[in-house]
Amino acid sequence: MSEMTLSQAWPDVLTSAEAQFLSDLQGGPQAFRPRQPIMRCEQPVESALYLCSGFAGRYRSDKTGRRQLLALQVPGDYIDLPGFVLGHLDHDLDALGPVVVRGTPHDRLQMLYGQAPELVHKLWRISLIDASIHRYWIFRIGRLAGRARIANFFCEMLLRLYARGLCDFHAFQLPLAQVDLAEACGMTPVHANRMLAELRDEGICTFADGSVQIGKLPKLFQIGQYSWNYLYLAPDLDAEIRGRVIGPGRPAAGALSAATSAA
């Protein structure tokens, strides 16, 4: 897979010149193997890592070593911007498949305050969108149940990847084992397997071999009670998605979850 550029990842946030300027601040590529640690909790952070290719997971462990998947990062994400201010992360970061990152040393980011303060604001915006996604994960696990939770998760991953040109509306790559999917959705592997079977048997979607195939796109969004306002997508992209999954005359994205019944 070719590297995701900043201009591809954030076209509605960064101008082409700004994206190139930030890219020039980055160091060389660093490659990680599947399931290899990228960063560990409370270790000093000296650069901001940009995910050029592959998927990475954020984890936190309890005292017995059992881990919880907190977030999934996709190509084009900055995966540790908070470390620039905080000095370290409060969780672990692992590669879920082959991963390539590029780091921007913190002293170069510090330089932006004097040379390009508008870029500091835009990096803050990127970090806030990431935080918005984290909040939505809490909502998904805390409020949705059963297959709605899995359908909702699939909807999110579809749109995040589609927004960066990494898939179409028919299928997308998701390099997770079924146990990872269950963990991301806050359920046991047995329960997740049962919910996946329901979605498959109804022709809505299938999940196998690290890929999600979508059979009934509007139904997937309806079952997942999914609204995407927390992704802060560009207006034209938001309108395109609404037309594909809701249709004209139906509620807008922010109202979708309230307009559909629980699954």
Image (tube, rainbow, N blue to C red):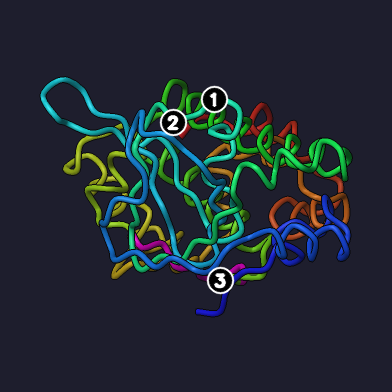
Asked if residue 169 is among those painted magenta in the image, a careful observer would answer yes
Q: Are marks 2 and 1 in contact (CB under 8 Å)?
A: yes
Quarter of the image for residue 35 reads: bottom left
**Can you tell which of label 3 and label 2 is closer to the viewer?**
2
Taking the spot 53% from the left edge, 53% from the top edge, the residue there is 157
3D distance between C-alphas at marks 2 and 1: 7 Å
Query: In the rendered view, would you say 184 is above or below 199?
Result: above
Looking at the rendered structure, which numbered label has been put on residue 170?
3
Q: According to the image, label 1 marks what residue? A: 86
Q: Residues within 10 Å of mark 3 (few under 14, many from 20)?
A: few
- Pointer 3 or 1: first along the chain: 1
Dominant secondary structure of the residues highlighted in magenta in the image? loop
Taking the spot 51% from the left edge, 28% from the top edge, the residue there is 87
- Image: magenta residue range: 168-175
Q: Is 225 or 136 nearer to us in this picture?
A: 136
Side (left or right) of 65 relative to 156 = left
The disc labelled 2 sits on which kind of residue?
Answer: Leu
